[in-house]
């Protein structure tokens, strides 16, 4: 261990009123969001110039494995919308989530994947409901109303 200070969380403010309110809310099922609000999911595969061919190959493997169970979007070779890297999108129904996440968790290789639900609130979906496979990135939330 180095002589570094305590982890960041040790420096954060103690739980105040809003944290306590949040804890109460989680215990109150009437304020929980229901997964039935999720109409679909997106998985966005990120890549840089060095990993372009790897990303193409993964895309072909995804198409072969999932066929019509996922809808593949365009191969964007530049940042688009809130995404800070080149990317392509998989869109799929909630019923496919376990297979898509499991398959990508095992097969993403050196590529990173951003997943989010689609509930009709784009900012919340991208900012508060993000799921990452591999490394996480800061999104440009202005593109989704942030
Ligand atoms: Zn998306």
Image: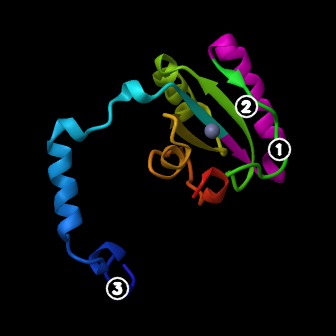
Look at the picture and state if 107 lies above or below 140: above
Disc 2 secondary structure class:
helix
Separation of marks 3 and 1 at Cα, in angstroms: 39 Å
The magenta segment: 45-69
Residue 92 found in image quarter: top right
Separation of marks 1 and 2 at Cα, in angstroms: 10 Å
In the picture of the structure, the residue carrying the numbered disc 2 is 58
Q: Residue at x 79, y 47 (%)?
A: 51
Q: Which residue sits furthest top?
A: 68
Look at the picture and state if 38 lies above or below 25: above
Query: What's the mark number on residue 5?
Result: 3
State yes or no: residue 111 in magenta.
no
- Mark 1 Cβ inside 8 Å of ligand 1: no
Quarter containing ligand 1?
top right
In the picture of the structure, the residue carrying the numbered disc 1 is 52
State yes or no: residue 52 in magenta.
yes
Relative to 123, 110 lies left or right = right
Query: Label 1 neighbourhood size at 10 Å, few (<14), some (14-19), many (20+)?
Result: some
């Amino acid at each position: 261990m180095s002589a570094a200070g305590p982890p960041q969380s040790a420096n954060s403010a103690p739980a105040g009123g809003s944290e306590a309110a949040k804890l109460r809310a989680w215990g109150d099922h009437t304020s929980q969001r229901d997964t039935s609000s999720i109409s679909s999911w997106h998985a966005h595969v990120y890549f840089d110039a060095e990993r372009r061919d790897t990303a193409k190959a993964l895309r072909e493997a995804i198409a072969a494995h999932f066929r019509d169970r996922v809808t593949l979007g365009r191969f964007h070779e530049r940042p688009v919308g809130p995404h800070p890297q080149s990317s392509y999108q998989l869109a799929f129904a909630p019923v496919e989530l376990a297979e898509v996440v499991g398959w990508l968790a095992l097969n993403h290789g050196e590529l990173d994947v951003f997943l989010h639900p689609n509930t009709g609130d784009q900012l919340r979906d991208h900012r508060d409901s993000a799921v990452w496979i591999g490394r996480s990135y800061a999104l440009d939330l202005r593109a989704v109303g942030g």
